[in-house]
Amino acid sequence: MVSESFGNFDLVKRVDVSYSPIRVSKWRSRVTGLSVVHIDYEAPIVKGYFAVATEIFNDSGCPHTLEHLVFMGSEKYPYKGVLDNLANRAFSAGTNAWTANDSTIYTIATAGQQGFLQLLPVYVDHILYPTMTNSSFVTEVHHIDGKGEDSGVVYSEMQGRENTSGDLMALRAQRAAYSPTSAYRSETGGLMEALRVLSVDTIRDYHGSYYVPHNICLIVAGKLSTEALLGVLQDQVEPSIIQHGKAHGPRPEGWKRPFLETPSVEPPVIRGLHSEVVEFPEKDESTGEMAMYFVGPSPKDQLTMKAIDLLGIYLTDSAASPLTKEFVEIPSPYCTYVAFYEDTRSTFSELAVYFGSVPSEHLDTLDERLKATLQRIVAEGLDMDRMSSVIARDRLKLMSALENSGGDVFSNVIINDFVYGDSEGGDLDKSLGEYYDVLKTWTSKDWTNLLSKYYDAPSRLVVRGKPSAALAETLEKKEKARVAAQVEQLGPEGLARLERELAAAKEEHEKHIPEEVLTSFPVPDVNSISWISVQSAKSTPSSSAAQKSGSSELEKHIQKDATPLTMQVQFDHVHSDFTSIHTLMSLAQLPDDLRPYAMLYQMCLFNSPINRPDGTRLTHEEVINALDKDTVAYDSGLGMDGVFSELLRVSIKVESTKYDSGIAWLRDVIFQSEFTKERLEVTLAKVQQSIPEMKRDGNSVTRSVFNDLAFDSTLTSKNAGVTSLMEWIPRMAAEVQENVQGVIEKLESVRRLITSPSAFRFSVTGNILGLPTPKASLAANFKNLAPAEPQALRWSSDALTGLGKNPAKKAVVLSLPTIESSYAIHASQAFVGFDHPDSAALRIALEVLDGTESFLWKYIRGSGLAYGANMGLSLESGLVTFGLYRSPNSYKAFQEAAKVVRGLCDGSIELKQTSMDAAQSSLVYALARRVASPGKAAITSFVNQALKGVSQNWEQDVLAQLKAVTPSQVLDVLKRYVLPIFDPSASIAVVACAPGKADDIAAGLTSEGFEVERRTLEVDATELEVVGSIEGSESDDGGSSSDSSEEHAHLDVHPELR
């Protein structure tokens, strides 16, 4: 075999993926050891994942804190934020990163290759040679302010996480499973106690040990020239590494690969049943959580790992799954979800089963119940017809993901191969393989043997998370006492010194990046972006085959099918193997008292028996099993693509050959579903049992209370917020018990109103040209719809309250005992309309404020005042918002944001052309990302034309508008639309915070001029009542969600984005 080289780089391995047009090439420098993997496929977005294997044997948080410091400047570019400022000029939305248990991953995504290649050497310089200054440590990691309170970006992040149930349980599991010599035992994010004593010198030492070229892999996914990629590294990165004396080849003497050649290689030792109980702070003690851990196979055993993945899907993915039926789909659930997870480790894998929202009375016995259930499944064998369906559907989902995301699907596979795989590429083929054909030959015995071996193992670790009201009070008292003792120990002189140090650090970070550094990076040409072509055609009740002939290929194809349609349908064709059918039904005509029932109706979709027109009755389990065989995906939600929530959307995605079947299913789900007491009990019980867990999410609670303040009862989606669910779910559950027929009649009233002919809109996206008769099946299955034009859309602006229309004075401060930080939303009114003449300028203004390393980032996040601060704009409601996420004190962050906006408006803070360039460039990326896959492009075409009322290629039209925006226009819209957010006479505010912070925040807002209402999220007694009995077992598929994206509850302390 002839070796292939480019400069210092030798080709280690090349794999052409057999089931997709994707090529993966692994290269390595023989001089420096730096590895590069190019995942080559067609896509308008180029993504980078720059991986470092990071191992830590304590809870100092060195990997996580170093991740943050990398972005604070480098040897060649010693300016805070320069990397993100340059990224913003490269058709990107800035950089990001996460820290996992075994690696730190730095990310970038750009529209097109020009900006990516331009930024690459700058990014690598930051990774290899970060400045790691004392001032960066003070603001980004940890400091004590003049009041004696601890803060810093990393500290604020961990403060918001450390005492949550998930983090506490995961850390206890790590401690119980791994020996003190294993890095898997550590909290890589850093515990607050350790962060308070961590020094920047310790972080520098850690960087010197692990951030070396032979321990770094640059993974690039997307369409760009491999030669150009290697050329940039050869000419601009390798010389710097050599100059720094770090060119020691792929395997320097004495080097030990993290996790593989250290004590961490040893698997956990769990002897018999090991049980741990962890308390977490929560005043509502009705539900907890439980996790079970097992030691799994080697990650190199790809076949077994895939089999375990499919087994977890078989057991839990829908209402027809054995564990979901037995534990969730019953009137009094043992939990609200069961999830299986697999995590790759050195020579083994970590398997976990997680139970969410477990009634406290079941926490002590749930593991034994699971064990007995699994043993029964082993004894009875698997339903092989259903397992065949699971395998076939998973394969289709992979093909769909590859179509939508291309080779980016493999990014995590490549990261794991870098950390744990053969350094010579020997495992890459197997990692990228697909094992469905082999697994289709497995017998029931093969599957039950697998289940017994790994999940009925005698050795297992059980961690029970129990809510504790006493702990919530104890933590609050301990924190106040700790801070008081800290203040006393420091004394006035010490506090004054720390305040001066903080001010000096902030001042250093506020130094401007020289304009020539920024302008030396030209903004790429927007014409370099390749847009996905979408053909669009519309059929309306008034159109006919005799209508004038369209000119496009799609229009001609649609006209060949002479079937008349009685409803409006838009067809959007892209190159695809799949077709999606979406129905959108207007909720505008519903009486307010029926809106909660509309939410229940949506929850029951795909989750109820069906009486087909031919007289066949399918149980809800038969419905789910048949849907899983016939479709690739199905779900429902309010709105489409984040807008127009007064439309109930029902979507089904199928292989194009099953188009007719998909439409028939859509008809049956909407018109033929049967509401039964049993299914209503189960559906409501699951949501009711989830409410205590929902109330632990500060961000969600803040959003829910804000929606209550800004929108009236005519906004249906308001009923999905936790504060609304707390009211209507228990009430409706009781109503089902007392008068189920009354509930069913109201659901039928909802169905009758939202399925009137004028309530419908239809969208068909995907491979339309591959459908022989695109209209015929729609006409046949919806033949009972009389001809009608769609009702006018109802905008969320139509549902604004008086405070929503004219925000003024009102502020709500909500005490939430389950959090230690604060979350906030401040809002004012701007304008309504997607084509408003000020929209382009306001988009630029908001991006100028909250783009990565822009003004809010520098002044708020950079000062440790919040983990996140962002601006928001709804062109449907007209509300413009300022939001805070995980802030030690949201009022202080609000004050700082007000200073920034006022400074820009009065000229004391300069708005430079480079800030304008960066904002415009970032918005180019954001618009390109909206249409970055065939599926996204087709959906966007429909939403633009049929809902927003703008052109099909609106994103491209907006680009020209953005380019024309001037600094004076930005300052004008800042004064008119953004400044009012910080004026109590023109704004409203909602804050959710830890009880110990409520007094200070409320006092601060009052001093600004807000009329503050204090609230505490209490537990209503009805939430704790159990409805029904423990008999029955049926249920819902995860496809019915309030959003079109799939969401999964995570067990691990999954890495946070920077």
Image (cartoon, rainbow, N blue to C red):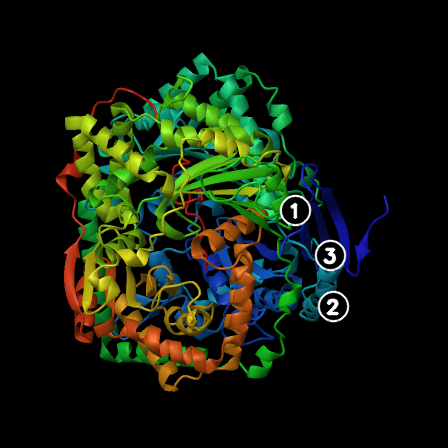
Which residue is denoted by mark 3 in the rendering?
226
Eye-nearest disc, 3 or 2: 3
> In the figure, 241 relative to 516: above or below?
above
Answer few, some or many: residues within 10 Å of disc 2's Cα (few below 14, many 20 plus, some between 14 and 19).
Answer: few
Q: CA distance from mark 3 to mark 2?
A: 14 Å
Residue with the mark numbered 1: 553
Mark 3 or 1, which is nearer the eye? 1
| Residue 218, image quadrant | bottom right
The residue at the far front in this view is 546
Which kind of residue does numbered mark 3 sit on?
Thr
The image shows residue 348 at horizontal and vertical percentages of 54, 36
Question: For the residue carrying disc 3, how many other residues have a C-alpha within 10 Å: few (<14), some (14-19), or many (20+)?
Answer: some
Q: Nearer the viewer, residue 422 or 654?
A: 654
Disc 1 element = helix
The reply to whether residue 312 is visible in this rendering is no
Q: Is residue 757 left or right of residue 595?
A: right
Q: Secondary structure at mark 3?
A: helix
User: What amino acid type should be assigned to the residue bearing mark 1?
Assistant: Glu
| Image mark for residue 235 | 2
Q: Quadrant of residue 165?
A: top left
Which residue is rendered at x = 16% and y = 44% of the image?
1019
Q: Label 2 sits on what residue type?
A: Asp
Would you identify the image quadrant in which residue 746 lies?
A: top left
Q: Position of residue 675 (x, y in %)?
A: 29, 26
- Residue 926 position (above or below residue 335): below
Question: Among all residues in the image, which is located at the extreme right?
Answer: 2
Vertical arrangement, residue 594 with respect to residue 624, above or below: below
Camera-nearest residue between 1028 and 859: 1028
- Name the secondary structure under disc 2: helix
Q: Earlier in the sequence, mark 3 or mark 1?
A: 3
Q: Tell me, yes or no, if residue 938 can be seen here.
A: yes
